[in-house]
Amino acid sequence: MATKEKSVVNSLLDLPEFEPETSAVKLPRLNIVLELRELPYDKLIKLTREPEAQLHLILAAVTNHPEMRDKAWYHDKKGCATPVDALKKLLRKGEVEKVCRAIDQLHGYAVGSVVPVAPETMQAAAIDAAVEDLEKN
């Protein structure tokens, strides 16, 4: 039993470090491309608690337009108190929804990102692991 627990821990330790996925979306009406980056889980959860969470999510995920968070853009140019208010002026509701959908896909909410494993496959893998443990000892 201890060797099984040790092999599970070892397999978890061998997992690769978090490497954020990226993608890009184009907003034809504005003729801009937004490069998006996956966010760490804790930051994603924190953003979901914010009012106007979708707009906060966009601000956090966009990597190629740092001016969106620059006071010169949102306050001086757009006349808004916050970057979120400026995005509300700039983007349509449908655009916000579609950009957030693209961000969600980066975070694993796409078809195929998690797939069920048949019980037979799990049993075969367990038998293979048990045989491998026996061969080692």
Image: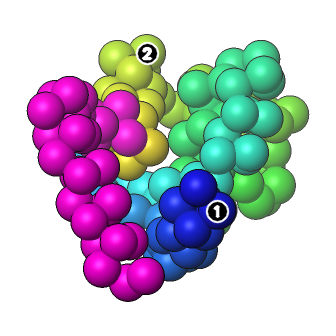
Q: Which residue is mark 1?
A: 2
Residue range corresponding to the magenta coloring: 108-137
- In this orientation, does residue 30 appear? no
> Vertical placement of 136 versus 47: above or below?
below
Dot 1, crowdedness within 10 Å: few (<14), some or many (≥20)?
Answer: few
Q: Tell me which residue sits at (43%, 82%) in the image.
A: 137
Label 2 vs label 1, nearer the camera: 1
Q: Which residue is mark 2?
A: 93
Q: What is the quadrant of the N terminus in the image?
A: bottom right
Residue 37 pos. (x, y %): 47, 59
Q: Tell me which residue sits at (52%, 61%) in the image.
A: 4
Q: Amino acid at mark 2?
A: Lys
Residue 66 pos. (x, y %): 63, 65
Closest to the observer: 56 or 2? 2
Closest to the observer: 115 or 44? 115
Q: Secondary structure at mark 1?
A: helix
Magenta stretch: dominant secondary structure: helix
Residue 46 pos. (x, y %): 78, 35
Q: Is residue 71 left or right of residue 116?
A: right
> Vertical placement of 104 versus 88: above or below?
below
Closest to the observer: 134 or 71? 134
